[in-house]
Image: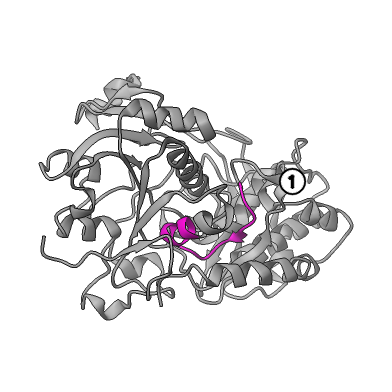
Amino acid sequence: MRLSRRALLTATAAAGLATAPAAPTPAPVPAAATGDRPRTGFDRLRSAGYSLLHGHRVGIVTNPTGVTTDVRHIVDVMHADARVNLVAVFGPEHGFRGTAQAGGSEGRYDDPATGLPVYDTYLKSGQPLADVFTASGVDTVVFDIQDVGARFYTYIWTLYDCMEAARLAGKRFVVLDRPNPVTGRAALGPVLHKEFASFVGRQPIAQAHGMTVAELARLFNKEFLTKPVALETVLMSGWKRSDFYDASGLPWVPPSPNMPTADTALVYSGTCLFEGTNLSEGRGTTRPFELLGAEGLDGRWAGAVGGLGLPGVHFREAYFAPTFSKFEGTTIGGVQIHVNDRAAFDPVRTGIALLVTAKKVWSGFAWRSDHWIDKLTGSTGVRTMIDAGATADEVVASWRDELAAFRRTRKEHLLYG
């Protein structure tokens, strides 16, 4: 039975509050601060009685990942609490309730569960998005979405666009922090060149940024916005930069339809680059971004990339038939990525090595004709070097200086030990 979107949607203060203004950077919140499992920004906001929101008409930018530890959606929780005057919801790509596939959204509607108006932010920015905030009647815009740590995952640019729009509309902006699921240990990969700015990369940050959304908000506000917005960030407690997502004890809710597990996030900042090629990136399988392949590929690819001795990862010859997207309904060959040492694994280096070896072993290899790979990597460098026969190590070495410069800037905005 095929359900309409509306029918599908219908079916479906004691603790201390750590807030951080735009500047100066506060001291990091150590894991020992609470003596138990990490607590999200929302957990701490609620436990303090929502004092940060008192007297404000509140709108929230969120999606299905905006949940409590017992998987209740924070919009449902806040709407039921008389201490919060929640008047609007703003949905990003995939929508507030998450019913849309990549490149889609849910549009404008009233949420059946709460009756709240839901506004669509997808592909809106600048004054048009500011006008949406103004029309909604909010005083404060709150952001709470789970990120996955990659520059081309669009929610961080929804954050950026909403910060700029809130500034234009004269609204206060509050970011509720959540873990970076692949740790915040280091930034990796090439840095975006401004001439390649798009919705998969508005500003020059590294491909794997190694930051939380609150840290990114502070970086955006200081380094990239035309003028700073009135920003406050509600920090987590108990989270360490070395923590992978499972250390948080938090439930994993897929941030988008093709990000089913935290394992997907682990490889995504490298293997999403295959969106820029004619190979399948695993969409339409149960392991998107972990399965890669194409018609005509065979076990030679797994042998070639496995022979490079990349740390923390094994490659298995695999055959699969995507149910949608590239090669829909066709059995194709390729590899499955098996990460065996998360601490040693470098997703970006691995993604480059997979591109280099795929081009060597498969004569059918091609970049997408729109040069989407350049938007994903942030310049023409990766594509032109691979076409010229560069090794994976040579490609990785090419962004050393720009990455070092970004790491210096990034360090000023880190909030956790």
Total numbered circles: 1
Q: Can the viewer see residue 103?
A: no
Q: Position of residue 323 (x, y in %)?
A: 52, 35
- Identify which residue, 295 or 25, lies in the foreground: 25
Residue 92: quadrant of the picture: top left
Can you identify the residue that label 1 sits on? 195
In the rendered image of this protein, does residue 129 appear above or below residue 379? above
Q: Secondary structure at mark 1?
A: helix
Q: In the image, is residue 212 part of the stretch drawn in magenta? A: yes
- Identify which residue, 106 or 266, lies in the foreground: 106
Relative horizontal placement of residue 208, taking residue 264 as reference (left or right): right
The residue depicted at 59 percent of the width and 64 percent of the height is 347
Amino acid type of the residue tagged 1 in the rendering: Glu
Q: In the image, is residue 9 part of the stretch drawn in magenta? A: no
Crowd class of label 1 (few under 14; some 14 to 19; many from 20; radius 10 Å): few
Residue positioned most to the bottom: 32
In the rendered image of this protein, does residue 103 appear above or below residue 383? above
Q: Position of residue 142 (x, y in %)?
A: 33, 46
The residue depicted at 24 percent of the width and 71 percent of the height is 37
The residue depicted at 30 percent of the width and 29 percent of the height is 137
Residue stretch rendered in magenta on the structure: 201-218
Q: On the rendered image, what quadrant is the N terminus found in?
A: top left
Q: Can the viewer see residue 261?
A: yes
